[in-house]
Image (cartoon, rainbow, N blue to C red):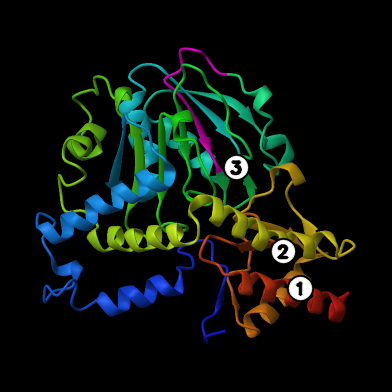
């Protein structure tokens, strides 16, 4: 322990200590320029080098095939909820898999722009599972099928992705991007806010198959058109340069951990420590989510009553743990174990859970 908190926040979330230290060392004078990278023109050679290198790292780590373009946008995933139907619906139907809180926001936003069809939903189970892929039902002429890969609030995650054939698959990967290997060719588009696994808030990653764009309606405002950013290498307007720089450092850190295969192994080990504490507690802790839909990023669990949960949160905070209170919309407890959350933190939480059970069981 270096005096840093055991950070289980759901987002903005933990960043690798090595990344923070490097950013600190480079903060005032980046590459002997006499300036911080935050002070530089986005048209200058130094910043553009970072911008393009970050794209190259993403292509390498995700093995992104030809025909896709990486965009760095702003406004978070929430802006993408609107941009997607604005650019792609064009009088057609957008199909959505309704898996919980974030899928619900995407669906509500899309309804403002056109026809929305629900391909499957886990509402009957209070969104505590991912619908079986075999139950997905959507028109074969749908503009796209949209999924939320990982629901941070409920704690569910797609273990596999649907094969949608000729229907473009669009996925919100905000909370599990770069946490495991991914076949990008399965998707028409991937998008993710950075503030969980990629870096700080401020930049949104979009990976877009270029042939999807077609004729975007002229009524779509310039800044909300993917083709605007595609044609300008995400430099149409001033990009969130510092956030992109931080993503660059995080990607290098992931590469140093063995890439996505190495990160996945570490994540499964970390999360397994906490799920094991739940599963071996003889009912003192109860996992919220069906076992086959459990998230590797957000572990949600309950205690016997809300009063005991409040005691747990208070005791955990006194012990140096941050962010274990569940989202206000669902209550309970949640440990977010994103890439930069250390194994040490998860071991400490597992030990804390065992001791809390011993004292209060």
Of callouts 3 and 2, which one flags the residue occurring earlier in the amino acid sequence?
3
Q: Secondary structure at mark 1?
A: helix
**Neighbours of disc 1 within 10 Å: few (<14), some (14-19), many (20+):** some
- In contact (CB < 8 Å): disc 2 and disc 1: yes
- The residue labelled by disc 3 is 100
Image quadrant in which the N terminus is located = bottom right
Q: Is residue 172 magenta?
A: no
Viewport quadrant of the C terminus: bottom right
Q: Determine if the magenta segment contains residue 146.
A: yes
**How busy is the neighbourhood of tag 2: few (under 14 within 10 Å), some, or many (20 plus)?**
many
Residue at 54% over, 79% down: 5
Q: CA distance from mark 3 to mark 2?
A: 23 Å
Nearer the observer, 200 or 20: 20
Occupied quadrant, residue 245: bottom left
The Cα–Cα distance between marks 2 and 1, rounded to whole angstroms, is: 9 Å
Q: Which mark is residue 353?
A: 1
Q: Is residue 341 above or below residue 105?
A: below
- Residue drawn at 35 percent across, 59 percent down: 247
- Label 3: how many residues lie within 10 Å, few (<14), some (14-19) or many (20+)? many
Q: In terms of image quadrants, where is residue 341?
A: bottom right
Looking at the image, which residue is at 73% across and 42% down?
292
Q: Position of residue 348 (x, y in %)?
A: 68, 76
Residue assigned mark 2: 274
Which of discs 3 and 1 lies nearer the camera? The answer is 1
Answer left or right for 198 relative to 147.
left
Tell me which segment is drawn in magenta.
138-149
């Amino acid at each position: 322990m270096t005096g840093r908190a055991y950070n289980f926040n759901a987002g903005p979330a933990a960043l690798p200590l090595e990344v923070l230290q490097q950013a600190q060392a480079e903060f005032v004078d980046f590459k002997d320029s006499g300036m911080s990278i935050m002070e530089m023109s986005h048209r200058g050679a130094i910043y553009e080098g970072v911008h393009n290198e970050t794209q190259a790292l993403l292509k390498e780590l995700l093995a992104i095939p030809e025909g896709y373009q990486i965009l760095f946008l702003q406004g978070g995933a929430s802006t993408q909820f609107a941009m997607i139907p604005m650019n792609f619906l064009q009088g057609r139907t957008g199909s959505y898999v309704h898996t919980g809180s974030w899928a619900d926001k995407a669906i509500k936003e899309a309804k403002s722009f056109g026809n929305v069809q629900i391909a499957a939903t886990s509402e009957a189970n209070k969104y505590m599972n991912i619908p079986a892929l075999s139950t997905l039902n959507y028109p074969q002429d749908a503009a796209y099928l949209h999924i939320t890969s990982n629901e941070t609030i409920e704690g569910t995650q797609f273990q596999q992705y649907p094969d949608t054939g000729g229907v473009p698959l669009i996925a919100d990967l905000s909370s599990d991007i770069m946490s495991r290997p991914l076949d990008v060719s399965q998707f028409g588009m991937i998008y993710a806010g950075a503030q969980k696994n990629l870096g700080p808030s401020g930049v949104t990653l979009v990976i877009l198959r270029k042939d999807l764009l077609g004729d975007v309606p002229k009524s779509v405002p310039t800044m909300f058109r993917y083709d605007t950013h595609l044609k300008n290498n995400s430099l149409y307007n001033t990009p969130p340069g510092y956030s992109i720089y931080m993503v660059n450092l995080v990607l290098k850190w992931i590469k140093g951990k063995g890439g996505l295969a190495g990160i996945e192994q570490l994540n499964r080990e970390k999360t397994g420590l906490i799920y094991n504490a739940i599963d071996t507690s003889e009912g003192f802790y109860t996992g919220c989510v069906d076992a086959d839909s459990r998230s590797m990023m957000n572990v949600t669990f309950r205690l016997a009553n809300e009063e005991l949960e409040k005691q747990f949160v208070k005791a955990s905070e006194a012990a140096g743990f941050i962010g274990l209170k569940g989202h206000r919309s669902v209550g309970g407890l949640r440990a977010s174990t994103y890439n930069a959350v250390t194994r040490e933190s998860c071991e400490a939480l597992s030990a804390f859970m065992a001791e809390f059970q011993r004292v209060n069981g």
